[in-house]
Amino acid sequence: MEYSLSNKVFALVAFLLLCFNCKNETKPEATEKKEKPELIMHKPSEMANLMNGMYAYNLQIKQQIINGETPVSIPLDLIKLHSAEMSNGHARTAIWNSKVQNFIESQQSVVDTLSNVELKERYNAAINNCLACHKTECTGPIPKIRKLLIK
Ligand code: HEC
């Protein structure tokens, strides 16, 4: 009894968090305040951590590119996109599977110092591939990801 109730509460909280992460970025406060704080402090998924790492990395190389520097390495294991555990409600859908490889290749091409394609163009292509997947798989962070594009 106790156990299944707390499971339900956990599922509800996970669901609310999910809405926060992927859909409702602008209005989470009102609903969250009513929940028990110790329950909403659960760990972000391995995939969410990887995504946040990808965001931070691209923010950093965006600045380098604007400064005229050439990023030469990726300190992230993008292959983990194929295995990282996702938060409740997310899965490797057919759309995910059709987008992930293009993204990995375009992100890797940003640090391909032998490429003939302009650096800014390769960088924006990688960010557009983030957006291509997010359009259906996780819409909440889209405004934030869009700001990574170099004008
Ligand atoms: C192939 C699909 C796909 C690609 C490509 C992709 N994402 Fe994601 N992203 C997702 C999914 C699905 C989630 C939700 C993961 C979860 O909650 O476990 C997510 C979550 C996120 C989050 C929210 C993390 C959190 O704290 O909940 C951010 C920020 C993010 N992605 C940024 C990016 C950036 C930046 C890129 C490109 C550099 C990118 N994503 C590429 C599918 C993708």
Image (cartoon, helix red, strand yellow):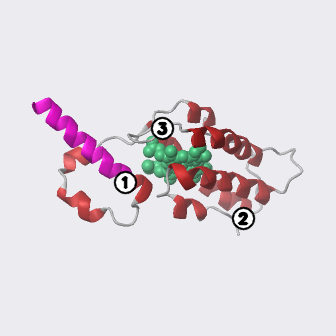
Q: Secondary structure under badge 2?
A: helix
Amino acid type, residue under disc 2 in the picture: Ile
Q: Which secondary structure class fits the magenta region best?
A: helix
The label on residue 29 is none
- Does residue 144 lie above or below 46 as drawn? below
**In the drawing, does residue 73 fall left or right of residue 80?**
right
**Disc 3 Cβ-to-ligand 1 distance below 8 Å:** no
Task: Give the residue pinned by disc 1.
Answer: 19
In the depicted view, which residue is nearer to us: 42 or 65? 42
N-term mark: 2 or 1: 1
Determine the residue positioned at 54% across, 38% down: 93
Q: Quadrant of residue 6?
A: top left
Q: Quadrant of residue 74?
A: top right
Between label 2 and label 1, give the one nearer the viewer: 1
- Could you give the CA–CA distance between mark 2 and mark 1, rounded to whole angstroms? 34 Å
- Could you give the CA–CA distance between mark 3 and mark 2, rounded to whole angstroms? 35 Å
- In the rendered structure, which segment of residues is drawn in magenta? 1-18
- Does residue 12 lie above or below 2 as drawn? below
N-term mark: 3 or 1: 1
Task: Give the residue pinned by disc 3.
Answer: 91
Residue most extreme to the front:
94
**In the drawing, does residue 48 fall left or right of residue 95?**
left
